Image (cartoon, grey):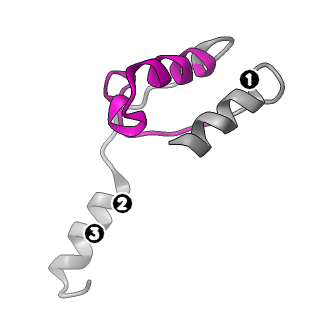
Amino acid sequence: MEVLFALLADRYEQRSVMISSNLPFSQWELIFKDPTTTAAAIDRLIHHSSILELNLPSYRLEAAKIGNQGGQR
């Protein structure tokens, strides 16, 4: 949590950052644990940003299901 927040703070308005997550922003308190830190991180991410939301099935989950059906782990 601290390393991710430090990265976002250091790169804020300096460089580009691309993050993918399977959690919506409303659940990011699970990552940062602190509501203030969560709000600050999200604020830095969405300021000057383009957000792409993809509601697609997980290809990794599907591959895992297929692999487990064949007796593989």
Q: Label 2 is placed on what type of residue?
A: Arg
Task: Tell me what residue is drawn at x 28 percent, y 69 percent.
Answer: 64
Q: Label 1 is placed on what type of residue?
A: Tyr
Task: Tell me what residue is drawn at x 43 percent, y 34 percent.
Answer: 32
- Marks 1/3: CA distance? 37 Å
- Kindly identify which numbered label has been placed on residue 50: none
Relative side of 35 to 72, left or right: right
Residue highlighted by disc 2? 60
Residue 28 in the image: state x and y as whole percent: 38, 30
Reply above or below: 41 against 2. Answer: above
Binning the other alpha carbons within 10 Å of mark 2 as few (below 14), some (14 to 19) or many (20 upward) gives few
Which quadrant holds the C terminus?
A: bottom left
* Residue at disc 2, secondary structure: helix
Choose between 56 and 27: the one closer to the eye: 27
Residue 34 in the image: state x and y as whole percent: 39, 27
Please identify the dominant SS of the magenta region: helix
Mark nearer the viewer, 2 or 1:
1
Residue highlighted by disc 1? 12
- Taking the view exactly as shown, the residue that stands out farthest to the right is 14
Q: Label 3 is placed on what type of residue?
A: Ala
Q: Are marks 2 and 3 in contact (CB under 8 Å)?
A: yes
Residue highlighted by disc 3? 64
Binning the other alpha carbons within 10 Å of mark 3 as few (below 14), some (14 to 19) or many (20 upward) gives few
- Marks 2/3: CA distance? 6 Å
Mark 1 or mark 3, earlier in chain? 1
- Marks 2/1: CA distance? 31 Å
Relative side of 48 to 37, left or right: right
* Residue at disc 3, secondary structure: helix
Which span of residues is magenta-colored?
18-45
Choose between 31 and 16: the one closer to the eye: 31
Relative side of 43 to 48, left or right: left
Q: Are marks 2 and 1 in contact (CB under 8 Å)?
A: no
